[in-house]
Image (cartoon, grey):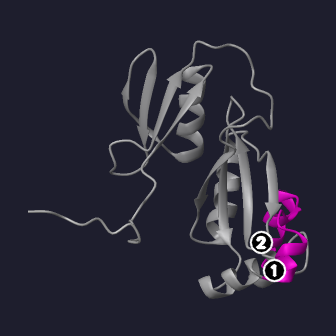
Amino acid sequence: MSRNVDTNKKVNVSLEHFVLRVADLQRSIDWYTNVLDMEVVHRNPMICFMTYDDEHHRLALAQTPVEADIPRGAPGLDHVAYTLGSLDDLVTKYKQLKAKEIMPAWPINHGLTTSLYYADPDGNRVEFQVENFASKEELNAYMRGDKFAENPIGMTFEPEDLLQRYEAGDALEDLVRIGFDR
């Protein structure tokens, strides 16, 4: 029986896991345990498999024998992003990590998202983001519009200001504009 492969077919793809080479395995295990609430599934002296859900692993950390630092901006992975369910979740995550003395490396409002980037011990970044629009249609329209084209990166902000304004009860519509007015 022969089969025809349709090269125009959209193939369903989802992110399973990522693997990072790290300089200090234990330090990286500690960081990802704190930041992503991960647990170790398997570990040996050279590699560690971790997860935060029922998947066998979402992250593998591999001890690298190379000791040289890679210059920031060199080709390679820039960051891995996680979407949180609400601004409340983003503020809660910020407070939880701040209590562990883990602070954002880059707080930025991209216009379409409000994001906090955290750098692991090797400089790899994890982004926690919340979408700033009520629907995918609004978000996609913003991304295709002139405002986004004028500033596709966004504006930095002070996470403490966001926290204080959130806890004071400022309107969510105002808080997702923090840093600039859409």
The x and y percentages for residue 85 are 56, 70
Query: Do we see residue 135 in this rendering?
Result: no
13, 34: nearer the viewer: 13
Quadrant in which residue 69 is drawn:
top right
Whether residue 181 is situated above or below residue 60 in the rendered picture: below
Q: Which residue is mark 2?
A: 166
> Which residue range is magenta in the image?
145-170
Residue in the image at 34% along x and 49% along y = 55
Q: Which residue is mark 1?
A: 170
Whether residue 54 is situated above or below residue 150 in the rendered picture: above
The x and y percentages for residue 115 are 73, 61
Query: Do we see residue 133 in this rendering?
Result: yes
Crowding at mark 1 (Cα within 10 Å: few <14, some 14-19, many 20+): few
Residue in the image at 79% along x and 64% along y = 163
Residue in the image at 90% along x and 69% along y = 179
Residue 14 shown left or right of residue 72 in the figure: left
